[in-house]
Image (cartoon, helix red, strand yellow):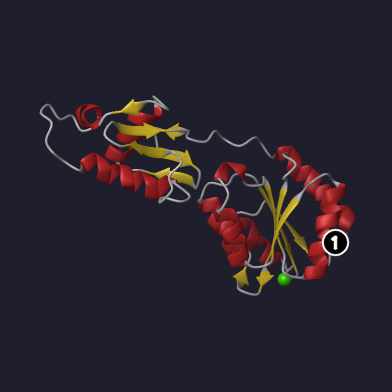
Amino acid sequence: MSSEGVFLLEDEPQLARVLVLSLEKMNLKAIHASSLQGARELLETRDFSRWPRLFLVDRNLPDGDGLELVDEIRKKGFDGAVLVLSARGSSKDKVVGLDQGADDYLAKPFDFDELAARIRSLSKRITIHENLWFLDDDQRRILGPKGWVVLTPIEFKLCQAVMSQPEKIISRDELLKNVWGYQFLPKTRTVDFFWGRLRKLFELDPENPKHFLTVRGSGYRFVK
Ligand code: CA
C-alpha cells in the first residue's frame, strides 16, 4: 500500500486524532474528512487512480450516513478496501453496510488492537490499482481519472482512435474518416462536439483539460 494509505471519514475530532496517530504508527498516512461533503470535495481534487486504497468510514455524520460515500466510490469503480467504523453495531446494521460495499464492519467502541489487525488483514487483499485509461471493450467503458465511464459506440471509437496514439496530434479529417467513416469531408463541428463530451466525462476540470487537448489549426491530441 502507498504511504498515502488511508482515507478517514470521521466527525468526532478526538477519535479522528487518535485514529490518525494510530495509523501513523502503522506507517499509514491518513487523509481526513469530517463530513460527506468534505470527503467528496477532497476526492474530487484527486485522480481516481491516486485515491488511498483503504477507506475507514464512520456512519453517523453531520450531513448523512457514511454508507452514502461507500456507495458512491463503489459506483465509480473503487476496488480497494472499505472498513466501516460505527456506533450502529447491530447485525442488521452490519449486513446493510456489507451489502453496500464495505469489506469489513467494526462496531464502536472498538479495541485499537483489533482495528489494527483488521487493517493489516485488509491491506493484504488490496491490489495495485488498475491502469488508468484501461479500455474495456466488452462493457464499452474506460477507466479515467474520475473512475469507470461507460461510453456510446462512437465515443468509444473516438477514444480508441486517439488513445492508441497518445501524444500524437490527429487531424479532424483523419478522425472524420476513421471514426465516422466519412469519404468526403463535410464542414462540421462533430469532432469538436464529441471532444467536448469526452472532456466532460473524463477531465477533473473540463475547462482546463489535461488529457483531451486541442491543438489550434492542427487537430486533437490525447495525453495520458
Ligand atoms: Ca459520528
The 10 Å Cα crowd at callout 1, few under 14, some 14 to 19, many 20 or more, is: few
> What kind of element bears circle 1?
helix
- Relative placement, left or right, of 148 versus 101 is left
The residue drawn where x is 72% and y is 45% is 4
Asked if residue 80 can be seen in this view, the reply is yes
Quarter of the displayed picture in which ligand 1 can be seen: bottom right
Give the position of the N terminus as an image quadrant.
top right
* Residue 133 vertical position relative to residue 106 in the rendered view, above or below: above
Instruction: Looking at the picture, tell me which residue is in the foreground, 87 or 27.
Output: 27
The residue drawn where x is 81% and y is 57% is 20
- Relative placement, left or right, of 85 versus 129 is right
The residue drawn where x is 75% and y is 52% is 30
The residue drawn where x is 41% and y is 50% is 206
Residue 43 at x, y = what percent? Answer: 59, 54
Give the image quarter of residue 112: bottom right
Residue 108 at x, y = what percent? Answer: 80, 67
* Residue 92 vertical position relative to residue 185 in the rendered view, above or below: below
Q: Name the residue under label 1.
A: 18
Give the image quarter of residue 19: bottom right
Amino acid type for the residue under numbered disc 1: Val
Residue 33 at x, y = what percent? Answer: 68, 62
Instruction: Looking at the picture, tell me which residue is in the foreground, 108 or 35.
Output: 35
In the rendered image, the residue lying farthest to the bottom is 62
Number of labels in the image equals 1
Residue 84 at x, y = what percent? Answer: 70, 59
